[in-house]
Image (spheres, rainbow, N blue to C red):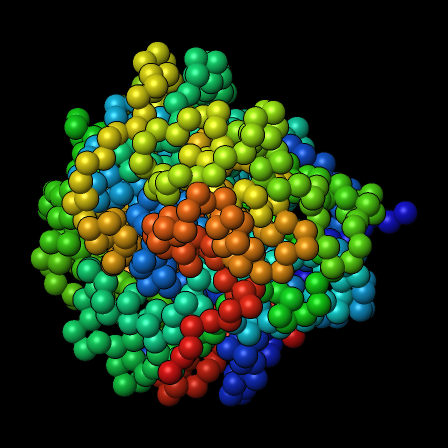
Amino acid sequence: MGILDIFRKKSQEGGNGMKKIEINPMTRLEGHGKITIFLDEQGNVENAYLQTVEFMGYERFLRGMPIEEVPRTVSTICGVCRGVHFTASMKASDGVFGVEPTPTAKKLRDIFFNAHMVEDHTAILYALGFPDFVCGPTAPPAERNLVGLIMKVGVDVGKLVLKKRAGAVKIFEMLGGRPIHPVAAVPGGWSKAITEEQRKEILTIADDLIELGKLTLDVFDKVVLQNKDYLDLVLSDAYKVVVNYLGGVDENGKITYYDPKEEVFVDTKGNEIARFKGKEYLDHIAERTLPWSYLKSPYIKKFGWKGIVDGDGTSLYSVGPLARFNVGGGFPTPLAQEAYEKMLNTFGGKPVHNILAYHWARAIELLSAAENIKALASDESITDKNVRQELTQVVGEGVGIVEVPRGTLIHHYKTDENAIVTEANLIVATTHNKGAINLAIKKAAQHFIKGGKVDEGILNMVEMAYRPYDLCFACATHTLPGRTPIELNIYSHDGELIKSLRNYEIA
Amino acid sequence: MSKPKLAFYLAGGCGGCDMSIVDLSEALVDVATVLDIAFWAPTVADAKYKDLEAMPSGSIDVGLFSGNVRNSEHEHIAKVLRDKCKVLIAFGICAACGGIKGLVNLHTTEQLLETAYIDTFSTDNPDKVLPQVSYVENGKYELTLPALMDSKKLDEVVPVDFYVGGCPPHHTHVAKAVNAILTGQLPPAGSWITMGKAVCEVCDKNPVLQGKPKTFAKTVKRIYEGNPDPNTCLLEQGYLCLGPVTQGDCGSKCPSVDIPCRGCGGPIPGVKDFGLRAVSAIASMLDNEDLVDQIPDPVHLFYRYTLPSSFLGKRLKR
């Protein structure tokens, strides 16, 4: 049964005259996102809530662990984001010992991380982003996935993309020790140097990855940009959320991932609000606990908590490829810069608040990360054997900030004098986006629900509203290569459940 | 002959096991053509729980269950899959033994929530509220959340036919396991799908494989102390490595980059409690008793991937 059949069936069940659909998702299905929409007296959207229903508890159970064991352990927060928690905590572990990695170790980490950017962006775009467009936004979910996409574009193209992506996984494994949940982190360094043969192999793969980046932008261009209906959707107000943005930049203000010099906030008009690095994040970001969700909502501290509202003056912000596009002054490599300028021209300036443009920025970043690998591996000195720093003291505190595929990731640890973790604080990319995702859903809902009349396409449109932010939907629900099961309940002003829709079926 | 029917389900895991299947890469396309994927949730889009439930008992040939069991949905689907699948496999260390996410069992739910939602550095929570199972927002919007449970391994909930180790299983091991399934070359029920060798047996640092004598560790080192000799056993150098008691289907990946094994492959055949066996194995390789006191964090070391499967149970809740 396809998604349209589900809409049809559910709308029949939940139509006027039916007080409540007798399904209690809490007794059966818990590992899914939950959306609840409340209508006002006129039957228009008054409020929408996206609830995250999973919770993992790493902040607590990392206590007592030696800091050097943390990277390979926290990596398991998410197996899709296979390199990110590892990398952020590894950088924090440098801080615990008050050292910087050796220059060679830093370059190896940088190549490793860019390889992750390539494989992750590829997986996300092809498994989740493109199927909406290539197979069509209203195609049945059974077709609107990686396998459906391969069938549509052809087995040969599918294999080609997977083969090229496998090159990025190979670099990741070569350097990190394992293809998923890597282990080569050492405070102040990297566990093993590479050989000249390995460097050459990385270079060869890098050329292939650059081809993958070009191919991906080409697919985006042909499928989305040259299709007026889709381009209109990208530019539509239904998919526009006006918030502030946070992203990391290098010493020239360009977009960078592994080790940004600084994090920069820009406001809804694109003006710089603040810059920070390391532990200063605490001066700028606070996370509000919401009693109705397992995900906290971060906000810009100096603006104060204003609730989940968008528009000028909001204290909410977004992270991720579009946020980096809005914050950064372009890319350090030529092909990505060229693509950046094309996107900039299409929108006629920054900041871009059209959230479907996340996919475009993601495709450009794929190419940029591939170019970064090539530039780094062209440096013959990376085969130097000095990859471990001598550690002479325990400072006892470290913060690691990395620009990961889904946005800014912050890991912060305190340790005792033996470098044993006493406290841990993690702000993951999707957490930063919590407020904005809520708003995106509310916007889409307002657009498609009018005067108590619920458009049956609402569920699909709502899905398209949250998907651009974080297609694996938090390092919490982990849903590649598919979608987060979502239940959507709509309540009237009197508190009556007037419609219940979901993109999965339940017994 | 019709194609074998396969089901895949991710419960309380990280998606890494799914990604290992994606990492089969081009082979994935070939696998997809020889198998009939009857159910893949929540990872593949069309999560038809109802259709799954409507299938006759035993109508799916093989079910792969990844992640541990931490809420009632996980438990429910485990029971449904057990009924529908001729063969049910605990796929990856979380399903087999609880995994890293099973470390939540060291703490009470209250401790876990307080740390995450009140104590952490950047949290703004003036009224010290915690996420509520049921909450009325602004006096009118009633919102509900599922309650949290302890982590369980899959066979605490339903009988399991086979186990696959790894966090996640390396994609080459996945390929071998899939091949074993497709060709029917499965071991006796209740076994691990493994080549049956420990990490040490496939580790090129192993002195025995180099024709050298084994020696005891004279110190206990943290991984950042000193420069490990790439050709010498990490354990002998004092880096506590759990290779002796861990299945080596990974091909000894971690030691190959001079990082000690932490046991994600699961226990070697015949071992029920991984941590207890690991304690005994490590103790027998230390030069003297005093070294035991230098092990900084025994529970996270010996039970990192297997706490929910330990005989020791969990921390007492008072």
Residue B162: % across, % down: 71, 56
Q: How many marks?
A: 0
Give whichever of A426, A28 is nearer the camera.
A426
Q: Horizontally, is A90 left or right of A177 in the view?
A: left
Q: Is residue B134 visible?
A: yes
State whether residue A217 is above or below residue B185. above
B303 on left or right of A144: left
* Residue A451, image x, y percentages: 39, 75
Q: Residue furthest front?
A: B288
Residue A114 in sight from this viewpoint: no
Q: Which of A84 and A468 lies nearest the eye of the viewer? A: A84
Going 29% across and 80% down the picture, which residue do you hit?
B137
Q: Is residue B271 above or below residue A102?
A: below
Q: What residue is shown at x 32% (from left), y 31% (from top)?
A: B226
B206 in relation to A321, above or below = above
Residue A372 locus on image (x, y percent): 35, 24
Q: Residue visible at 33% across and 63% down?
A: A60
Percent x, y for residue B46?
Answer: 62, 58
Q: Nearer the viewer, residue B281 or A21?
A: B281
Task: Tell which of A481 and B282 is nearer to you.
Answer: B282
Q: Quadrant of the C terminus of chain B?
A: bottom left
- Residue located at (38% from left, 70% from top): B107
Query: Does residue A312 sit above or below A158 in this rendering?
Result: below
